[in-house]
Amino acid sequence: MKKLERSLSLTSVIAISIGGMLGSGIFVLPGLAAAKTGSSVWLAYLLAAVCILPAALSKSELATAMPSSGGTYVYIERAFGPLFGTIAGIGLWLSLLLKSAFALVGFGAYLSILVNIDAGLTKYIALSFLGLILFLNILGVKKVGKVQIVIVTISLITLGLILLFGLPRTSSELLDPFLLKGNMGLLSTVAFVYISYAGVTKVAAIAGEIKNPSKNLPRAMILSLCIMTSIYVFVAFVLVGNIPLDALQSDIKPIYTIANIIGGSYVGYIAAIIGIITLISMANSGVLAASRFPFAMAIDKLLPDFMAKIHSKYLTPVVTIIITCFVMAMVILFLDVEKIAKLASAFMVMMFILVNACVIVLRETAAQWYAPPYRSPLYPFVQLFGIFSGVALLVLLGATPLLAILAILILGVLIYIYFGKNATRTGILRKYGHRPALYLLYKRKKRGQISYRNNQPEGMQNLDGKLASDAGVVVPLLGNERSPEMLVEIAAAINKREKIQAVNITEVPNQTFLDAMVEENPRIASLERRLARLGKSQKISIDFEAAVTHEISDTIHELSDQTHCDWLVMGWNGRAHSGILVSNPIGWLLTHINSDFALFKDDGVRYIGKVLLALRPGRKDKNFIAVADRICAFYNASLTLLHVVPENMPERGILEMEANSIKLLKKVDTKSTVIIERNNDSIGAISKISASYDLLILGTPQQDNWISILFGTGKDKYTEKSACSVLRLTMKDH
């Protein structure tokens, strides 16, 4: 299967990047950081941003060269090989789960403000919500990303209000001492708050979905880093300028404290609620991201195969989700807040050192495929600054994080020794590096031990990952169609151009690593064979592709945009629309796509000889008749134009309607008739008449009741009661 690209604008990418940074770094960490350096904590946040800038620039370059899911793990593995890929995967996994565990501890503290909980029980409250997050991730609950945007917006507004009212209240007396433990205290705090900015590079993992990534990706990273640096610096300044240091240094809910000081208890409660929502959302997204790394490593044969298992029903990496949550639970139970933050920062610093090193390795080895559209400025000085500053920060974090990193290195080497023989790729350094590096890092392999992944199966040559830009109709196949052949045949009947683009789409939850689903499977091969046979027998030009996606609506929308098609034709179960409270992709697409839209409800009819066109009042009669005429010409069928009118309609009105209909039908070549049915029950009348036909063509309903609008559960009653197959058309104004 191929992953279809979706266009994310600069604004969207900035929002995603900010969302990755906003959380425990400002809602929990400032008080603990202030205890290490005094009122200069705001300067520590500023210096940490400077130290992380090289990694942001380096990841921008790497992501435009390798726009694939997996991000940092992929870059390190491609540059240094599976040994370092193993170490990096474990390090990234631990840094993310530690950051999520840190958020949950802070969440418990904020919750204790609203609910009378003993301080000793906050860890257990955090564990109970970790259990909820575990099940949400296993079940593959979607739409988390859209909710995240709302949460980020509310959090930013809250922090903005704190700055607006807190800055004028700042007391110069509370700003003393500036350096509580001298320059070394400040520098160690820089290392401590480093984890706050880790999310800035998260967007690199979706480089393949960003519009114009060579420009928008680095811009988004730098702009979001500047925005969040400003927020961190000024909020930290407001905190130390309004809260006495002896109170702030042990406070893991500082945003509640400052809100309570500025606006009183009710404002404090509101800030606590926002803190709870932000931190629980951050923890959930952290589990989602963290569980992908061991999952990806298992796919690459660097961990046991059972860790690559996907739940048969929910399509989520259930094993790695459970392991991730279990380790998080152990961290929450047995580590204090400061140790969690230190370890998270240490692992992230280590990863960013390797990211900067990746750029140097890939540029110096001059690998032929490495041609990033964006190149980091001031190479290699920016990367060297990132590496040396990172090493210095690791030293400043103290002995415990360094020992933990050493343990990860040893664990990574042991895992590689045991599983590395199954690794499917080698690093660029092994292929192109100088001999000292080769002898130091790799053992030579005997010739002939070359293995390949994702080989194209025989007979699947049509799956080239390219969409037909000249296709008149696009047919998304979601796997629930009664007969894909019949749906494609209907599309061919509607088509005014030569080619049809059929795309089999597999939607997987956000928790599932997309690359795990790209292998072709027998069902896809069978579907391609069947459609090829249909094209040959009916003399239809059909291009077939397969895609895997996290968001089916966006992907179908992108299909329409990329192909510039006239029509989008989909299978349908008769559901009328999307609800506000219950999502339905069909309803969303009806209001967002630019092409005309046809929904086909297959009733099992395989030979279409009689077509019934039931026009509702106010429809574009000429357009509907033109489509019906093309369908009848394709099937050599007859056409009947049906009008159902009220029983009390005057005879004069009926004669006028009949005359207009006959006039319209004279313009088509199809054998056609007009039926005008007097009946107050239009649904019953169409249902009864449809029994004599093979295909009923309808338009889109114009009105819905409020229950249907809220829950999206309404059925198109004309379609539901029909006794034959139904084609429902939605035509845009062109």
Image: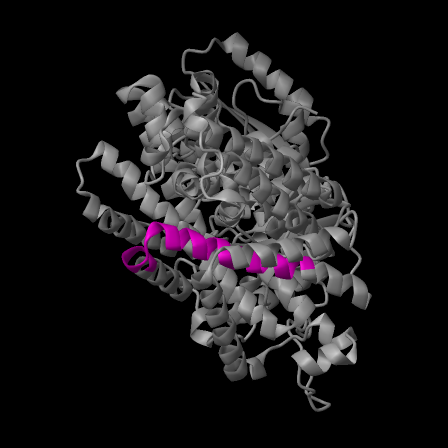
Viewer-closest of 716 and 724: 716
Viewer-closest of 461 and 285: 285
Q: State whether residue 196 is above or below residue 526.
A: above
Residue 486: image x %, image y %? 57, 53
Residue 283: image x %, image y %? 39, 47
At x 44%, y 65%, the residue is: 310
Residue 461: image x %, image y %? 72, 67
Q: What's the magenta bit mostly, secondary-structure-wise?
A: helix
Viewer-closest of 288 and 667: 288
Q: What stretch is highlighted in magenta?
A: 331-356
At x 41%, y 30%, the residue is: 580
Viewer-closest of 686 and 383: 383
Q: State whether residue 465 is above or below residue 177.
A: below
Side of 226 relative to 260 (left or right): right
Residue 268: image x %, image y %? 31, 25
Residue 162 is inside the magenta segment? no
Q: Identify the image quadrant of residue 695.
A: top right
Q: How is the image coloured?
A: one colour
If the image is split into quadrants, where does the C terminus sit? Answer: top right
Residue 132 appears anywhere in the view: yes
If the image is split into quadrants, where does the N terminus sit? Answer: bottom right
Side of 11 relative to 136 (left or right): right
Q: State whether residue 220 is above or below residue 394.
A: above
Q: Identify the image quadrant of residue 577.
A: top left
Residue 349 is inside the magenta segment? yes
Residue 514 appears anywhere in the view: no
